[in-house]
Image (cartoon, rainbow, N blue to C red):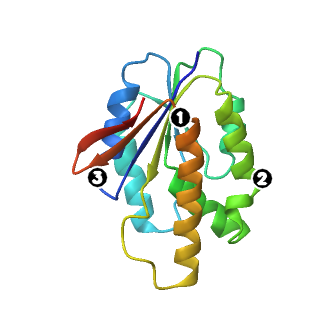
Amino acid sequence: MSRIIMVTGGGRSGKSSFALDLAMKYQNRIFIATAEPFDDEMRGRINRHKDERGKLFNTVEEPLGLADALRNLKPETEVVLIDCLTVWLGNIMHHYGTEAENSEQVKAFLDVMRKPPCNIIAVTNEVGSGIIPGDKLSRIFRDSAGRINQSLAKIADEVYLIVSGLPLKLKG
């Protein structure tokens, strides 16, 4: 039976490296990259992540349609590493507005996650541990990410919180 592992933590906490290590236990690995290269800084981040993965993963770049990407996997896929859900949420908000949490993309993704096609490791940011954001859009993003994270954590078999590079197993 396929398992879902959720990896969360703050920015630069080590969550992506931890998730990559988990995925290396499998042979047929897919990396779903959600980032869109909107500017030079993001292009640099994307290139650094590609260099970090090397040729150890087959990469699918999918900034919006995660559910379709998961539905269209080859049957031999053993694990998919999605990095990351908060970037994906930002993309949906950018393209479709602030009602992203209730969008068809989010509903379809959570539906696929209830019966995953293979093992899935999903990386997401913990965005609720800081101060309350000062502007409405940031509060909407923080609240939406928090609720999506809660929905995924309920479905997930294992949940890890990464702090300063150290994993704390919260579930499973």
* Coordinates of residue 171 in the picture (x, y in percent): 42, 35
Q: What residue sits right under mark 3 in the picture?
A: 13
Which numbered disc, 2 or 3, marks the residue that appears first in the sequence?
A: 3
* Side of 129 where 153 appears, left or right: right
Which numbered disc, 3 or 1, marks the residue that appears first in the sequence?
A: 3
Q: CA distance from mark 3 to mark 1?
A: 20 Å
Q: What residue sits right under mark 1 in the picture?
A: 156
Quadrant of the image occupied by residue 93: bottom right
- Mark toward the viewer: 2 or 1: 1
Q: CA distance from mark 2 to mark 1?
A: 21 Å
Residue 35 visible here? no
Q: What residue sits right under mark 2 in the picture?
A: 104
Does 116 appear above or below 104?
Answer: above
Q: Residue at x 71, y 31 (%)?
A: 71
Looking at the rendered structure, the secondary structure element under dot 3 is loop
Does 103 appear above or below 66?
Answer: below
Look at label 1 and name its amino acid.
Ala
Image marks 2 and 3: residues in contact by CB distance under 8 Å: no
Looking at the rendered structure, the secondary structure element under dot 2 is helix
What mark, if any, has residue 64 been given in the picture? none
Tell me the crowding category of disc 3: few under 14, some 14 to 19, or many 20 or more residues within 10 angstroms, Cα based: some
In the image, farthest residue toward the right: 104
Q: Residue at x 46, y 50 (%)?
A: 124
Q: Which residue is more in the foreground, 118 or 102?
A: 102
Q: CA distance from mark 2 to mark 3?
A: 30 Å
Q: Which quarter of the rendering shows the N terminus? A: top right
Look at label 2 and name its amino acid.
Glu
Q: Which residue is more in the foreground, 90 or 167?
A: 167
Residue 44 visible here? yes
